[in-house]
Image (tube, helix red, strand yellow):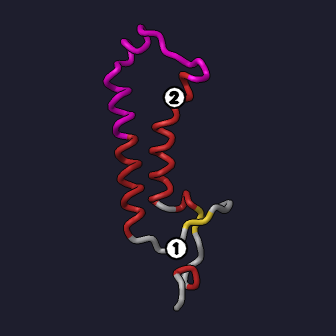
Amino acid sequence: MAELKDFVAPKWWLDTKRGIGMFMVGLGTAVPVLGAWFGVTLDPAVITETGQQVAVWFDVTWNIVGFVLWVWGSFRPTAPLAVMKP
């Protein structure tokens, strides 16, 4: 029986909706934690000026879009994912 890899060439993982979605969710999760770990913090005055709601909205929107791309890209893959340089 022929395998999928016999018909299509593997893609670099960021060339897919699923890969981009996984990257966005990972980045949206890791950036706030890494910022605090490296000592990058915002003063309450800065947070008040820019608006805490804007930051929360951006984070939520970013992660939702990333998750939707991840799931959407997983429905009908046309090639196996491969870890390779573009």
Q: Secondary structure at mark 1?
A: loop
Residue 54 picture location, percent across and down: 34, 26
Q: Secondary structure at mark 2?
A: helix
Q: Is residue 9 above or below residue 62?
A: below
The numbered mark at residue 33 is: 2
Assess whether residue 49 is covered by the magenta stretch: yes
- In which quadrant will I find the C terminus? bottom right
Q: Which residue has dot 1 on it?
A: 79
- Residue at the (37%, 33%) spot, across then down: 58
The numbered mark at residue 17 is: none
Q: Is residue 2 above or below residue 36?
A: below
Q: Outermost residue toward the bottom? A: 1
- Residue at the (49%, 28%) spot, across then down: 32
Residue 44 picture location, percent across and down: 42, 9
Residue 14 picture location, percent across and down: 55, 57
17 with respect to 53 (left or right)? right
Distance between the alpha carbons at the discs numbered 1 and 2: 33 Å
Tell me which segment is drawn in magenta. 37-61
The quarter holding residue 57 reads top left
Q: Does label 1 or label 2 sit earlier along the sequence?
A: 2
Q: Of the residues shown, which amino acid type is indicated by label 1?
A: Ala
Q: Outermost residue toward the top? A: 45
Q: Pointer 1 and pointer 2: residues touching (CB < 8 Å)?
A: no
The quarter holding residue 11 reads bottom right
Q: Of the residues shown, which amino acid type is indicated by label 2?
A: Val
Q: Nearer the viewer, residue 39 or 44?
A: 39
Residue 76 picture location, percent across and down: 40, 71
